[in-house]
Amino acid sequence: MATRKTRIRLGIAGLGMGLSHARACLAAKGVELAALADIDEGILEKKKERIVKSCGQDGYERLCSLPLYADYRRMFRMAELDAVLIALPTGMHTESSTLALECGLHVLCEKPPATSAADMAGVAELARSKGLTYMYARQQRFAPAKQLVRKLVDRGRLGPVYHAESKWIRSGGIPFRHGWGVNKSHGGGVLLDLGVHAIDDGWFLMGCPRPVEAFAALHCSFPHLGDGQNLEHAYDADDCATGTIRFANGASLNFTATFAMNTAGPHGAPLEGEGAVEWLELNVYGVRAGASIHDSRLTFRKGKTETVRVREIKSAMPKGKTELMLQLEHFAGCLLKGREVQNTPEQAVMLMQMLDALRESAETGRSVSIAAPANRKLETAGRRL
């Protein structure tokens, strides 16, 4: 009898954000980091100080001992892998996810999963047809407080959820990324960077209802801050995104996300090395109760009176864990046990539908309807390894 695998062999494509995933892999259960890929073959040496600070000299040496491919395509085809984590620039997500699936590899892809709903639908269908698992990365979903509130929503403790508000505000700190992060044609802009987090956070807590309509405004107000940054691509993408999404069950979601905003408050946490601050707010409102992740409070309304009962949301990160580690362990566990992942391809398609509609709304100045997904559910089989 063949021995069942206890770990998945994972390769990481792209060592920008991928480097954070790589460090998490060193301590995550059920994961064996087997290969790395980045166009800059000297990237580990360049980031040595940062790596050693976060995971020690031993961790740095472990990463350096792995095969490092200058072309992620060669890694997909040549390395002995079960799955890949794609952390390449947004505009490369569809192409790289498609190739990985065609190579027989399961995929965990950084957000946003694609640059359009049509592209994401193609990736989801390919994963389904090949019996492979596709999951889009949203490590913030694995924060203990959010997992707890989602359970309360699923159990009906908040009553019917009718509205949510989500904000990710920066007073500064624009991720130029040599122009990739602020160029529209390369998938840059705050909507696809921070906005996807803000939207998905609220949507996840609401139970991921089907979106039917969206309205948004996108602003490009600070391109002059790109002067002197030696940008390879023009700063022409949005640095402020705000809008509303309506769902098939009648619920609604308001969101705001900014790279830079001239505001005096509220006062948030400083961004390391950026000379700016950022703050996040997440509120979900049900008929019976409401929850706020920002101040960790759950507020219940009693009967028809104005009397409310407030209690703290008691949840803590497991010792020694991070959101990135919990996400990796969930992904690996689903592959090893043949379970469906939490962040499904079907959700990825609906998320991209929302982003497409929001961009169209900003361009036209009108609300945009969102069509229902295809009748056949887009999901992966999550086969055992």
Image (cartoon, rainbow, N blue to C red):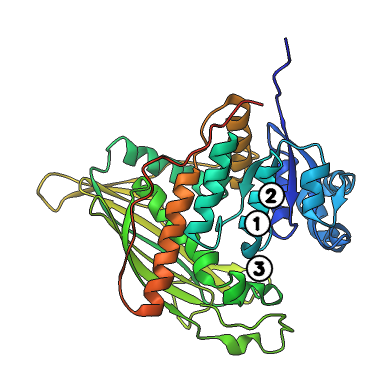
Instruction: Kindly indicate the quadrant of the structure image that contains residue 30.
Output: top right
- Disc 3 marks a residue whose amino acid type is Glu
x and y percentages locating residue 204 in the rendered image: 41, 49
Is 135 rendered above or below residue 216?
above
- Disc 2 marks a residue whose amino acid type is Leu
Mark sitting on residue 272: 3
Instruction: State the separation of the CA atoms marked 2 and 3.
Output: 36 Å
- The answer to whether 233 appears left or right of 347 in the picture is right
Nearer the viewer's eye, disc 2 or disc 3?
A: 2
- Marks 2 and 3 in Cβ contact (< 8 Å): no
Dot 3 crowding, Cα within 10 Å, few <14, some 14–19, many 20+: few
Q: Which residue matches tag 2? A: 99
Instruction: Kindly indicate the quadrant of the structure image that contains residue 358.
Output: bottom left
Which one is nearer the viewer's eye here, 114 or 180? Answer: 114
Nearer the viewer's eye, disc 3 or disc 1?
A: 1
- Marks 1 and 2 in Cβ contact (< 8 Å): yes
Q: Quadrant of the N terminus?
A: top right
Instruction: State the separation of the CA atoms marked 1 and 2.
Output: 6 Å
x and y percentages locating residue 98 in the rendered image: 64, 50
Q: Which residue matches tag 1? A: 95
Helix, strand or loop at mark 2: helix
At 55% from the left edge and 38% from the top edge, which residue is drawn?
Answer: 129
- Disc 1 marks a residue whose amino acid type is Glu
Q: In which quarter of the image is the C terminus?
A: top right
Residue 281 seen in the current view: no
Q: Which residue lies furthest to the top in this view?
A: 1
Is 240 rendered above or below residue 127?
below
At 53% from the left edge and 66% from the top edge, which residue is drawn?
Answer: 192
Instruction: State the separation of the CA atoms marked 3 and 1.
Output: 33 Å
At 46% from the left edge and 52% from the top edge, which residue is drawn?
Answer: 349
Which one is nearer the viewer's eye here, 272 or 325? Answer: 325
